[in-house]
Structure formats: structure tokens, C-alpha cells
Amino acid sequence: MRRVVRGGPPSLPISGPGPILGCVAVRRSCLKWAEYALRFDPTEADTKEMARVFDRRRDDAELASTTDLGEVHEIPTLEEPTAPVLPTPYDSGLGTDAFGEDGLRDTDGDFEVTARRFWLTHMRIGFGAVLGESLVMEAYLALTPHGHHRSQLWIIATSWSVLTATNLGLSQAVSYKSWRATFSVTWTILSALAVGGVAGLDGGIHSPMLVLLFLPMGYAAWAFTPFAAAGCGVSSLVSLAFVEALNGDVQTFKESTLLLWATLVGTSVLSVAAARNRTRREHHEALLACRIVELATIDGLTGCVVHRVLHQRFKEELARTSRHGRPLSLLMIDLDNFKRVNDTYGHLVGDHILAAIGSALRACSRSCDLVGRLGGDEFAVLMPETDRAAAVALAERIRNEIPKMLEVPVTFSVGVSELNTSTPTTEQMLDDADIALYQAKRGGRDAVAVFSGVDRASPSDQARGA
């Protein structure tokens, strides 16, 4: 039976397989638990929540008190194009990358860049701290050359320093990976378990290296989920239990480690609580930011994208279409004599009509089409992978079918333009569609006109009817 002298460092039986196999089993269990916990990564959860918010249809804009949209989905629509179309389109054709260059553009990309920068900073600070503690441990070993198992500890400290320095250099590459959070949690748990092993070799429960068990829990509270923070706390407690089992002196446990155990447990609880409060706050801030972006990009009355977003997305789609040589068409839609509707039925009814029209336009368009409100009673539909004939067919359906769904008699004039390869600019397409719309107005309204390109109306002829 091994005799342990109270107050002195125990001799570690490293030749026996029991402690080694037990440590390996504990490590494997903690790693599996950490992998499960990281399924609740707050960064990924917030990104998915933002996507769900943008996916939500603007039903609150569909005021049904004076409209009947029950048949809106029966309007024939164009088939979805097989060629590459706008990335990640949503109900109104607005993808999460469809925002302007004033800080709202490329939202998915911005979220990813922010998350990548966060994890890069987090890993660099973490590995930098571990590297610093490894150097401190080497200095401690140099100052205590006659302690227990100094050869093994020197090998462990040197290897850990090299491995940590390598991971510090790889942080840039790891920050681009989807498993970066799992990587960070795994190394935090391994660091806590390594502290237990090193403390056991150094002198058991009396080793000053046990104070390093507090670092993983503080590090976890900064960025990990509550589940992952709890895993880091458990790993620190497991390390202390491992060292205590090696010490083997119950009386020493009562006198020397009770306060250490209480402090570790308390720190672990505080770490989980801090992680929980932080994730709640981040979740709330993410939803708030998403709501702000939605308000800045979606017209609150009609649910269509606003003028700025339409023009920005127009430029992006025009560049893609010109690069791949694909067709692109534009519809410019104007309600005929809408002022008369407001004067006759009131502006509240007019707002209901606009909301219903915006909903119907989005419903009868493809997912790759972009429906926007130019202002007032004017709408536009940007149609990728669509030639002039298909655009005219959809314009006729809009002109014939949508008025039947409204309780107030309303007619539409629609101008159609197609991308001109000789002058492939957004201004040119908008001008062509505008001229075609004026032609439909001058021809008696309630019509679809296509820009022919033969001649252009003079500015004096472009006075639009009410």
C-alpha cells in the first residue's frame, strides 16, 4: 500500500495503466459533449434567425378590409429560369445580399465577416494566453529543478508551447471554417484537462498550477454558448477530481481543497450564467439589427423593395446578365388615374389598394424576380432570364387579372423594356421602360406598350396623365 505523507508531494505512479486510461476516457467524453454543445453556436443561430426574419412575408401590409386577394395565387406565372439567377431570393425578390453600399449591402456577407473577425480575435487571444502560460510554466520548472517529474513536465510544456504557437499561426485559416467554434471549445476543454495532468505530475493537490483551471471558464464565458461554457467548467472540475484522486488523502481534501472546490464550482456557475446572459443580449441585438435592415429595405405599405434597393439590385443583376449574355427585362407599372381613386374613396382606401397590388405583384412573380415600388402609385418588376415576349405576357396577365381582385375599379398602364446590349446600363433600361409607359398612357391607358427603339419621345411629350 502506497504511503502518502501529509503536506508533502505524492509520488505519481505513472507506470500503471489505470489513471492513463481513465484520463483518456474522460477526455473522449468531454469532447463528445462539447461537440453536442456547439450545435447551439450563438453566431450561427443568430444568422439563421435573421434569415427567417427576412423570409417572413409582409402580411401586415396586406390590408384586407377593402380588398379580396383570395385568388391572387391563381394568376399564371412564368416558369423559373434554369440559368443562374439572383442569389438567395426571398418573397419580394430581395435576397440577403441585396442592400446598398451604405452598410446594408451584402448582409449575409457582412454577418459572416463579423463572425470571422470575432472568432479570429477570440482564438488569437486564447492561444496567446495559453502560450504565455506555457512560458510561465517553463519558467516555474526552471526555478524548481528538483521537483517531481521534471523531465516529463519539460517535454509537456515544450510540446504544448509549440502546439499552441502553431495553432496561433493557423487561427487565420481556421476562422474561415464552419467548425471554428467547435475547434475553439475543444481546445479550451483540452487545456483544462491538460492542467489537471500537469498538476498531477508536479505535486498533486499542492501544485500551484491548479490556479490555471480558472482560465478556461473565464475564456468560455466570453464567447461560448451556455452549454459549451458548462462543458469547460466540467472539464476543470474533472481535472481537479483527477488530481484529488492521485493525491489520495481524504484529510488533505477536507482541509486544503474544500475552498478550491467551492471556488471552481462557483466560477463555473458564474461562467454559464454570463454566457447565457450574453447570448440573450446578442440574440436581441441581432433581431433588432435585422428589423432595422428590413425597415430600411422594404416598403412598409406594399411589402415591395424600396427605390434604393431596386436600383442597387438592378445594377448587380445587369452586371451578371451582361457577363453571361443572358436576357433581362423590366416592367414599369403605373395605376391609371389613381388620384381619382383617392379623391373618390379616400386615402385610406387608396393605401389598401396599393398594399393589395404590391402583394399581388409579388405573388404572381417568380422567386428570382424583384418587385419594387418606385414611388406613389408606380411599381417596377425586374425579371432576370426573361426576354421581351415573356415579359409582355406577364405584363398582360398583370393588367388583366389583378384589377379583377380589387373592389375598386382600377386599371394599369405597363411599359416593357429589354436589355439593349449596345447600351447595357440601368439608366437606359429605366428610360426605355418609362418611354414605353408614356406611350401606353398616350394611347388611352389600360394597355401594355413595348419600347421599340425606333424613336424616342421628346421631353415635352413625356407629360404623364394623372
Image (cartoon, rainbow, N blue to C red):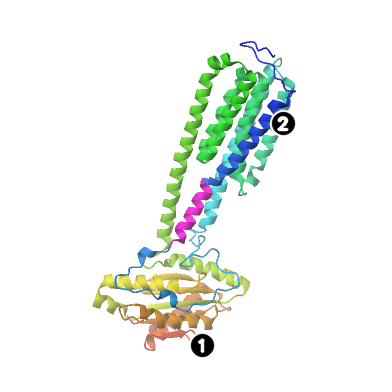
As drawn, the residue found furthest toward the front would be 1
User: Which residue does the numbered mark 1 point to in the structure image?
Assistant: 454
**Image: 411 above or below 252:** below
Q: Which labelled disc corresponds to residue 159?
A: 2
Q: Secondary structure at mark 1?
A: loop
Other-residue count near label 1 (Cα within 10 Å), few / some / many at <14 / 14–19 / ≥20:
few
Gap in angstroms between the C-alphas marked 1 and 2: 78 Å
Q: Residues within 10 Å of mark 2 (few under 14, many from 20)?
A: few
User: Tag 2: residue type?
Assistant: Ser
Residue 265 image point, x, y percent: 51, 27
Foreground: 384 or 283? 283
Please, is residue 325 above or below residue 19 in the view? below
441 or 244: nearer the viewer = 244
In the image, which residues are magenta? 42-56
The percent position of residue 91, horizontal first and vertical second, equals: 46, 66
Indicate which disc residue 395 carries.
none
Identity, as a three-letter code, of the amino acid under mark 1: Val
Q: Is residue 300 visible?
A: no
Image-based side of 3 in relation to 116, left or right: right
User: What residue lies at 59% left-to-right and 40% top-to-bottom?
Assistant: 34
**Nearer to us: label 1 or label 2:** 2
Left or right relative to 370: residue 446: left
- At x 49%, y 35%, the residue is 272
Residue 196 in picture, x, y percent from top left: 63, 26
Dividing the image into 4 quarters, which one contains the C terminus?
Answer: bottom left
User: Magenta-highlighted stretch: main secondary structure?
Assistant: helix
Q: Position of residue 94 (x, y in %)?
A: 48, 65
**Considering depth in this image, is 459 or 412 the residue closer to the camera?**
412
